[in-house]
Amino acid sequence: MLLSGSDILIRTLIEQECDVVFGYPGGQILNVYDSLYKYSDEITHILTAHEQGAAHAADGYARTTGKVGVVISTSGPGATNLVTGIATAYLDSIPMVAICGNVPTSQIGTDSFQEIDITGVTLPITKHNYFVGDVKDLADTVRQAFKLAKSGRPGPVLIDVPKDVQIAMCEYESKGPVECFEKAAAKDVRIEAAAESINLAKRPYIYIGGGVLASNAQTEVLELAEKIDAPIGCSMMALSAIPTDHPRFLGMQGMHGHYASSMAMHKSDLIISLGTRFNDRVTGNRLKFATNAKIVHIDIDGSELSKTVNSVHGLRGDIKLTLQKLIPLLDKAERTEWNDKIAVLRQQEEEYSDNREGLTPKNVVCTVNEFLGENTAVATDVGQHQMWSAQNLYFRKSRRFVSSGGLGTMGFGLGAAIGAYFGTKEKSVLITGDGSFGMCLNELATAVSYKVPVVVLIMNNGVLGMVRQWQTLFFDKHYSNSIIDRKTDFVELARAFGADGDKVTNLTELKNVLAKAFESDMPYVIDCYIDKDEFVLPMLPPGGSMDDIIVKAGD
Amino acid sequence: MNRYTVAVLVRNQFGVLNRVTSMFRRRQFNISSLSVSETESSEFSRITVTFDGEETYKQQLVNQLYKLPDVCSIKEFNSDNSVSCELLLIKMANEAANRDDIRTAASAFGAKTVDYSKDSIVFRLADDSRKIDDFIDLMRDYTILEICRTGSVSLEKGSTTIRQTINL
């Protein structure tokens, strides 16, 4: 069938089972938008307020569904506005396809109006990118982009489509959705060697990262933990993979991780690390990190093995398939002594825990927990509120925590929460701070336009809390540019956007307002005041080790 | 510190060299030399990279290369399993006092005179990197006007080829 490039583009998206795209039109992508108009019965386009919001929405959609998120923008500034969103997806290995228009091929390289070398710009933040110079290559390029985005270690792929390629006519033949590259387990000899070490271990600790979600290996992780009688800790990216109340689950470890989880890792003699990359927020000072532990590291990306910390057993392969081969080789063991030690650590964590009454950050997040359904996705922005959420949110289902881990993108949350709504088809929640929310609050307009019932909870302290915390601890309380105190009335602002909202100054009010917000079928903004000197604790000072951990304010 | 030579077979596509070097830059891999050209098949280009570092550094570089979708195959070379060659053009001042010394040295290294004028001589030498380094060191006693040298190119000894291990 003879079709225009833009029709081919949209038909190929539909063929790849993409039913919702996020984006923003403009001069050099108009033909694609005309095709979106034509095929609007089969594919829905969500218009955001800004391309960055669209990229974060595609990301939130991908994180909650595991499918490829798609974002469309015009050339030049449209394309550069995607950059933060693409980089966020890249650092967290989220499958995404970004499609940009560009000036006609005859004008490429001449600095035409709204021309930018977006394939050059996004080279270090995409798995791969394509400049489509010929309409004949368009359909296969889109298919290949989907394949790359979701295969192996997932990530964003960008396709740059000049305007004349969108207009040019070409034969199109529909094909089915592309399959991922074949998955494989790690090599048998490596699995056998790892099994030997695990069987000898006295204090094994299972440490999971985002790769467990990507590989869908949650069941195998639990099976492994049962068989070797070991606790499970996680990086922030793996939150929601294991139900929060699972008896073996110690929660997030790392800079602001749970005390018992970080300490158990520190004291273990063997870490089974699954789909993680031992980021600096996880290890602190790498020379002092878990010095007594051998590391068994399973990752689909071979370059992560021994990248930052040396692993004795580096197993390159799909986590699920590798665990399925590994588990039968392991001795069923009871490690009572180790588990007794962990029980003590849990007890200590309990003693250190914040039991204050009133509108403390912990109580705010725990109150939100009371309203969450099993399927409710919770997005966050970046900063103190993100860590309080990561520490205290209660998850029952995988892929329900949507947060920018690797890049730490303030302004990520609202777009992502909107994307999560389209992914889960259920009310989503955004926990944010007044700083982060101020960055991309324009997407409230999107939420109102599409009647997205997102509950936005702003932990408002008038300061950039995490910056302030560091300034308090490491910069002699020089609060340089971290006191924002902007006088923005977020409730009036919500109303101006056509949403609803309420202020909250105590826990009872919070409960009542949350009840209203969760019943509302429109976006609802809760402006919740917390103290500006709250700390995220425990805290492992940057470059420190577990010996330096701060567990209580004033320590 | 070891010297490593790695041959990389890549899809012969627009911008592929940029993708490879951009990754080196981003991950702060320091490259000693790099050469690139088309191969026996127009579908592929071949990049030869030499660099100094430890084993883990090399492993990380190779692993990161494998992640680039345009990379089809990678071979690690050493002097036992491969032959290497690089090319030098060196322009010397043509001075009566040491003309004979220079030409004797050049002929001892097997360098060929490719240009001769009243004031200058240009030699061409194709050999492995060490020999070329030695020749340049020797020429430093005289007046070097200009030097231009390529990166190393390497092929595996015997009949095996890099294309036999393509992982597309």
Image (cartoon, helix red, strand yellow):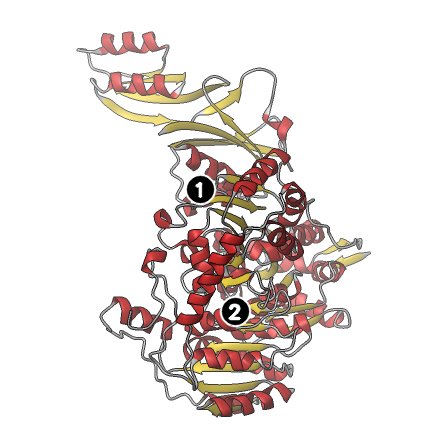
Instruction: Check chain identity for marks 1 and 2: say if they share one.
Output: yes
Q: Give the labeled residue for mark 1.
A: A310
- Image-quadrant location for residue B91: top left
Residue A88 seen from this side: no
Residue sitting nearer the eye, B104 or A360: A360
Q: Chain of mark 2?
A: A
Compare marks 1 and 2 and give the one earlier in the sequence.
2
Quick check: A226 left or right of A538? right
SS of the residue under disc 2: helix
Q: Residues within 10 Å of mark 2 (few under 14, many from 20)?
A: many
User: Is A486 rendered above or below residue A401?
Assistant: below
Three-letter amino acid code of the residue under disc 1 = Asn
Q: Give the labeled residue for mark 2.
A: A52
Quick check: B7 left or right of B88? right
Spatial CA distance of label 1 from label 2 is 37 Å
Residue sitting nearer the eye, A372 or A223: A223
- Image-quadrant location for residue A155: bottom right
